[in-house]
Image (cartoon, helix red, strand yellow):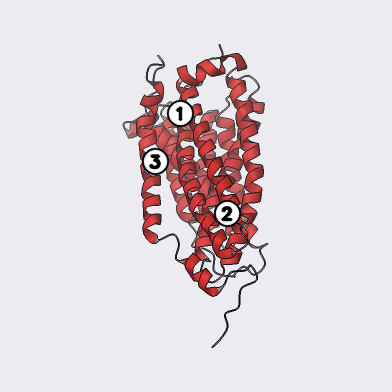
Amino acid sequence: MATAVADPAGASPRAGRRGARRGPAPGRAVAVLVLVAVAAVIPLLGPAVALDGTGEAEAPGTPGITFLRTVLFAALCVQTGEVFIRRLARRVPGAPRGAAPPSWAWWAACAGFVAALGLASVVASGNLVPQHPSDLDIGGLAQSRDGRLALLEVNAFVVAALCARSRRPDSAVLPLAAVVVAEALRAHPPTEASPLVGSGLTLVHLTCACLWAGGLLYALRTLWRWRAHAPAAGVAVLGLYARVAAVLFAAITATGTVSTLRRMPPDTVVDQLTETAYGRTLLAKALLVAVVAVLALLARRRLRRPVTADRLAAFVPARGEVLVLGAVVAVSALLTALPVPIRW
């Protein structure tokens, strides 16, 4: 009778098979349904809930604009995360070559293009939801700052889609960076005090958020793909991501705090968090991020276990982390569509 030999990480073949059976397919289907529901419910109901009782007026088309920004941010996260984790995976010894998860980059870029095109049509109609083709002033897009930024995002997603189909899909990092820069500039118009400071904070915040959310999604897809034939390598990829994610989380927290204090002076933060739509949404986002942090700590704790099969259990809290991050993306999109609080 042949003797089973443990792998270098301490997992026996039998343990590896037990770990490979974890996370049934129905769980993934439910996860997708939850993400779709979140992407639809928050844009549709979020504005009314956030504005209720504040005395602030809802801008025309807020639910639609929130949905389009949710799709745009999600597309950024998916494609950026794939580039990020593919580069991390190359540093893992023993990682299987040619066994990466199927890329979603092309689909993400197409979704981002459609969303950016929809947002550009809103800008072309004077920041109103167009009802007829005659409402659109396409030629006027190049004449305004917001219009040029909208066109930049549309074209950047086209280039990102072409990169995804090329032999060097990682080259998509350049057009994706252009989208992030455009979003950072759009969020802080020249009429704002110190707009370049605000744009810089948003640039760092959005970049880190895309790497965090998109990176975790692709790291989990990699772990699931390699669970049977290279579980130790899959766990190593997730471990490398977790180390970088700690730095990303710190940067997101710091830039988010400073941005909040720029828009809400310290002595008004408590009141505005409950009495303005922007503040309420920001509070909801902070609570969701706190839940994400707890799930991340739980996953990190399981990654420290000595046996590979036991470390695969980190997949469960990390999958929950992805779901909550999906809600964070939708809430962040809602935040961009709500009126900015008045500096009291």
| Vertical comparison of 274 with 129: above or below | above
In this view, the residue in front, 328 or 75, is 328
Query: Where in the figure is residue 226, as x and y percent of width and height?
Result: 53, 66
Q: Which residue is mark 2?
A: 302
Q: Residue furthest top?
A: 344
Q: Residue 249, located in which quarter of the rendered image?
A: top right
User: Mark 1 or mark 3: which comes first in sequence?
Assistant: 3
User: Mark 3 or mark 2: which comes first in sequence?
Assistant: 3
Query: Where in the figure is residue 61, as x and y percent of width and height?
Result: 37, 28
Query: Where in the figure is residue 2, as x and y percent of width and height?
Result: 56, 86
Marks 1 and 3, how far apart at CA: 17 Å
| Vertical comparison of 114 with 201: above or below | below
Question: Which numbered marker is on residue 337?
Answer: 1
Left or right: 180 with respect to 23? right
Left or right: 99 with respect to 59? right
- Which amino acid does the dot numbered 2 rest on? Arg
Query: Where in the figure is residue 344, as x and y percent of width and height?
Result: 55, 11
Q: Is residue 334 visible?
A: yes
Q: Is residue 171 visible?
A: no
In this view, the residue in front, 117 or 303, is 303
Q: Which residue is mark 3?
A: 38
- Which amino acid does the dot numbered 3 rest on? Val
